[in-house]
Amino acid sequence: MKVFYHADCLLHNPPFEILGKEVPYLETPSRLSIIQKALSEKPGNFEISDELDNNIDLREWILKIHESEYLDYLETAYDTWVSDGGDETAVFPEAFPHISLLPKKPYNPRELSSIARAGLYCFDLSSPITKDTYKSVLAALRVTLTAANEVRSLAAGEGVFALCRPPGHHAMPSLCGGYCFINNVAVAARFLQMATFQHSPTKLAILDIDYHHGKGTQEAFYTDSSVLYVSLHGENDYPCRLLLRGTTGDDEYCAALEHATTTIQSFDPAYLLVSLGVDTHIEDPICDFNITIEGYLRIGKVISNIQKPTLFVLEGGYDLESIGLNVRNVLDGFQGKNSLWDFFFFQYG
Ligand code: Q9C
Ligand code: ZN
């Protein structure tokens, strides 16, 4: 399986976030290095490449999902913040200009103070903007769209993986939050659809297996019958919604996933996009599910039953001990391979 990756994705590295108190930033660059290492272990058939398609006009595609005002904000927020006297560490909102506080008459958001702007375009304290954030955000999208280009030449049941960060599925047209800035999967969906557009829009399915609900992705396609969004996520957590109990383990999860795959199969999309989060793992520091390392192998197998050319894009997953094997097992299971864990056990166990 081809894997796209770029070192610029490591640049976004805020020292902390606020989770009731200051904690080290969980969505850390080492997540990528650890996964990259796990995919490089032998035996393996992953071909990791950092040769990205530099001809893709990222701005053009971002604007299919996000507002240009917001994109300009992401690009300029850090410099404006610092020149207004803000701390050089990162842009951290400290005031949230709720709609009732904003001018009633039309106004230019650029005229707001940089503190007010930071709160206007952000819904939580998990997405500080550092000097290099924008560069990483663009790199993540270029990795994703390069991989999306590749998925067009894949056969049914084959896959390609965009190994990138920051993640994207929480990002809204004009809002960052939940470690997300640009919705990589949503932009990739439009990119795939519009470049293969013939008489009617190409049907696509997005399967979101991150622990959290991808509100950004859901809203992008809510009224669009050509894109089916299916999400498995924890109930009563950040910020929505239904489906699986906090104690959900491998069996219960795979049963729900089989249900999701049946729905996707009857929709019969041209391509499948997978928002691949492994924060469902039992040891994840911010999530409640109980998926095991072995469970991810089963999850990959169930996804492969959909039998479509498949683009995997990394979302969450914060347990650094297991994240590498978890991601690798989804991709190994998808390709009908055994767990690397089984291999180690066989060799050294
Ligand atoms: N207990 C992704 O997995 N912190 N984002 C929320 C609430 C942010 C997760 C804390 C969680 C965002 C891509
Ligand atoms: Zn998540």
Image: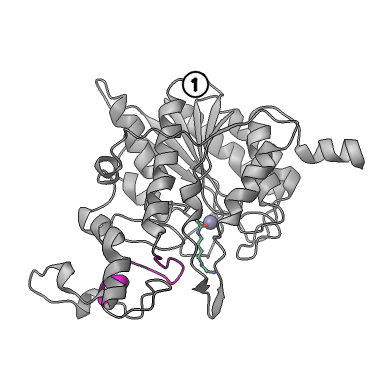
Name the residue carrying label 1.
Answer: 154
Q: Can residue 97 be seen by looking at this rendering?
A: no
For numbered disc 1, what is the local secondary structure? loop
Image check: 282 left or right of 201? Answer: right
Range of magenta residues: 116-130
Which of the two residues, 241 or 118, is positioned nearer the viewer here? 118
Q: Residue at x 59, y 34 (%)?
A: 303
122 part of magenta stretch: yes
- Image coordinates of residue 42 in percent, x first then y, are 75, 33
Mark 1 vs ligand 1: CB under 8 Å?
no
Looking at numbered disc 1 in the image, what kind of residue is underneath it? Leu
- Is 315 located above or below residue 15 in the figure? above
Q: Residue at x 42, y 25 (%)?
A: 270
Which of the two residues, 284 or 207, is positioned nearer the viewer here? 284
Q: Residue at x 30, y 27 (%)?
A: 195
- Image coordinates of residue 296 in percent, x first then y, are 68, 43
Q: Can residue 231 be seen by looking at this rendering?
A: yes
Q: Which residue in the rendered view is the most extreme toward the left? A: 105
- Image coordinates of residue 275 in percent, x first then y, are 50, 44
Q: Quadrant of the N terminus?
A: top right
Image check: 115 left or right of 254? Answer: left
Q: Which residue in the rendered view is the most extreme toward the right? A: 349
Query: Picture quarter containing residue 318?
Result: bottom right
- How many marks do you count on the picture? 1
Image check: 62 left or right of 105? Answer: right
- Image coordinates of residue 291 in percent, x first then y, are 69, 51
Q: Residue at x 29, y 68 (%)?
A: 79
- Is 242 located above or below residue 87 in the figure? above
- Is 180 located above or below residue 208 in the figure? below
Which of the two residues, 238 or 143, is positioned nearer the viewer here? 143
